[in-house]
Image: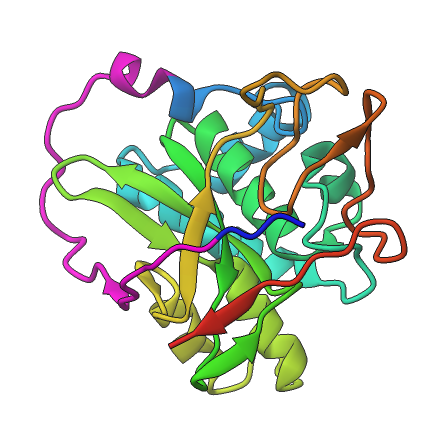
Amino acid sequence: MLTFSFEAVRKEVLVRDLAAPESAWDPRDYARELAPTSFGPTNGEVKKLADQITAGQTAVLGKAHAVYDWIVENMYRDPETRGCGKGDVCALLNRPGGKCADISSVFIALARAAGVPCREVFGIRLGKASVVDVTGWQHCWAEFYLPGTGWVPVDPADVRKAMLVQKLELKDAKVPELRSYFWGGIDPYRVKLASGRDLVLNPPQAAGPLNYLMYPYAEVGGQAIDWLESANFKYTITYRQ
C-alpha cells in the first residue's frame, strides 16, 4: 500500500481588474502555452473556428473573453462522460458535450489558436466539512495570460455544471452571475495537482505520453491500468481540514 499526503492553503482567487491597458509581450516567451497538443490542435478547423469567434478582437482580453462566451453558450456538461473527459478537441467540436477536462481543453485550444497563451490546471475539489472522502472529485479548469495582469483563471466547465445541477438555461437570471464569477474567479474548494499534456513521467512510463495527470497512474507489465475502472484500480483520497 502506498500513502501520500500533503498540506495546502486554500484560497479563493478573484482577478477582477482586467480593464487595465495590456503591456507589451513576446509570444516566444509563452511558446509552450501557445503550442498544440495531441488532443488539442491549433490549426485546421480549430483555427478556423477560433478566427470566427474572435473576429474583430485584437487584444488578448477580448479574444479570451470571446472564446469563454462561446464555450459557455455552445458546450454542455454530459454526466455520462467517463471521469473528467479525454479532452479530444476535434471530437468535441462535433459533439460539444463533456466534463471539465473536455470543456477546458476546447477553451485552451481555441484560445491558443487565437494567439492567447493558455494552460490547464488539473486538480481536485476539497470538502467543506472537517473530513470528506473526495475520491473521484478531480476537476480541471484553465488559465490565460493577460499581459500586464498575469495568469487569469477561468472555469466555463463549472458554469455549465451549475447550469446542469440547477436546471438553468442561458436565459435564466442566475446564469450571468455564474458567468461573471468564473471569468477571472475560482472558489477556494480546490487544489492544483498538475499541469500540462502529453506527459513523460520520471521514470518514463512504458505506455507512451500521458494525456494528463489528475488521477493516480500505474502500469503493470508495461501496460497502463485503467484508473477509472474501480474493479482493477482502487484508491482513496481524503480531505481533512
Vertical side of 216 occupied by 211: above or below: above
Magenta stretch: give its range: 5-31
Q: Residue at horizontal 59%, vertical 68%?
A: 160
* Direction from residue 114 to residue 49 in the image, left or right: right
Query: What's the colour scheme?
Result: rainbow
Q: Quadrant of residue 138?
A: bottom right
Which residue occupies 36% across, 70% down? 187
Q: Is residue 138 placed above or below 220 in the rendered structure? A: below
Q: Residue at x 76, y 46 (%)?
A: 227
Q: Is residue 215 visible?
A: yes
In the depicted view, which residue is nearer to us: 30 or 93?
A: 30
Q: Main secondary structure of the magenta part?
A: loop
Residue 137 lies in quadrant: bottom right
**In screen coordinates, is 137 left or right of 142?**
right
Depth order, front residue of 90/102 = 102
* Res 170 visible: no
Query: In percent of the image, x 60 and y 55: which residue is there?
Result: 100
Question: Taking 111 as reference, is 130 above or below it?
Answer: below
Q: Is residue 171 magenta?
A: no
Viewer-closest of 86 and 183: 86
| Extreme residue in the front direction | 1
Residue 146 position in % (x across, y down): 23, 39
Give the farthest residue toward the top.
Answer: 28
In x, y percent, where is residue 140? 53, 52
